[in-house]
Amino acid sequence: MIVKQLLAKTGSFDFYIKQLYIQLTVIIYKLKYLLVKVQPEQFVFESFQGKSASDSPYALYLELTKLLPNANFIWVFSDNKHEDFQKLQNISNTRCVVRATKSYFQAYASSQYWIINCRLPYRLIPSISQTVIQCWHGTPLKKLGLDIKVENHPTSSLKAMHFAYLWESKRCDYFLSPSPYASKCFKSSFRVSDIQIVELGYPRNDDLSRYKKDLIYQNNIKKKLGIEQNKKVILYAPTFRDDDFSAGKHRAINQLDNTQFKEKFGDDVQFLFRGHYFSEVKQHQDSFFLNVSSYPRINDLLLIADAIITDYSSLFFDYLVLERPMFFYMYDKDKYLNDIRGTYLDVDKSMPGPIAQTQQELLNLLLNTEKNNIDLKHFNDEYNPYEDGQSSLRVIQKILAS
């Protein structure tokens, strides 16, 4: 990691070193797995680099197990102690592998379909008989890939990072999109073509459409988390900052975990904190926030949240499906927009909720929620036009018919 950080500061030299490294790893991978036979109707799934069985890959997995009960399914995890690893390992026709092991590369080499929501190791090059479905992990607000123009990535030069996104787009056959807006962003940031884009809704949002009015389902989630059924829940889920990087990790610091917030709400509200999957979460021992950063399924948290607080995260696009209040705490707005990442939307004009730049502003907004009601229908028409709980089925039918 230290070497990556040092190379990131060398500009073109980092780019050429990365190219050389990629070509070497690709050659090694091909030599090792060239003769591996691709198994028809074998699917390998990877979500957030093995952090969990979640997001669109998990939604597609559940649908596929119903449509193709005799197919073989492989799940990738970062370690074999994960709760989802143990659970899925006991399901017929499903097995699990640990990321970056021999079994991991064997799984990709032998699977007809790769279903992922993150960038994969460069060496994984699909053969002509394999199909790669890139689900990605959200509708983008903050700029991605080739649309980023600021040189501030902690482990990569801008030129090398752009190359990485182009590499990803070249190996995927399908790139899922929930809307024309998202399709436009993906085309510019990954340079994917119209042929690659599958604009049929996000499988990850099927649960939100199906269970947004199901109180029994929602109360079972609260029970699992130890939250009283009648207590109001507010989820704070900020994204990571590219420049907040230390000891090889992005940090997730809860900006709202303080006496001021605790005194205003007391025990009337259960606050949840969800750090970005890139980040290492640090929280006070006496925090009044329930840390749900390691909870595997974000949709469960959205379903029980009466409101959310976020910033530049794509999370709010998904939460729109539930048509509930959302607030944007952008304490570093000018810096983020101009010096860190930038956004596709004009945040001062196009957000489906009020923006606060100070904690006092945010407190005032939260304490007067009824004054901040916004009609979210036209936002859903633009950003979630296909979300009816059937996106997974449509995507699978499209892929299997090709």
Image (spheres, rainbow, N blue to C red):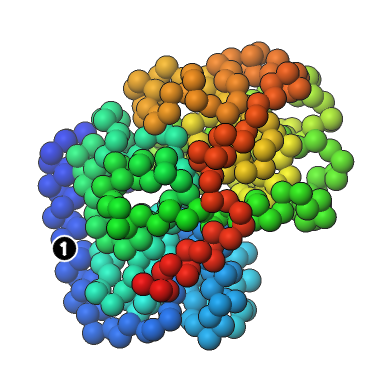
Q: Residue at x 62, y 36 (%)?
A: 377
Check disc 1 and report its element: helix, strand or loop.
helix
Task: Check disc 1 and report the residue beneath it.
Answer: 24
Classify 31 as above or below 200: below
Position of the C terminus, as image quadrant, is bottom left
Q: Is residue 141 left or right of residue 3?
A: right
Q: Is residue 177 visible?
A: yes
176, 256: nearer the viewer: 176
Classify 286 as above or below 361: below
Q: Residue at x 34, y 70 (%)?
A: 131
Classify 47 as above or below 142: below
Q: Is residue 268 left or right of residue 126?
A: right
- Which of the 4 image quarters holds residue 116? bottom left
Q: Position of residue 38 (x, y in %)?
A: 33, 82
232, 275: nearer the viewer: 232
Q: Is residue 8 visible?
A: no
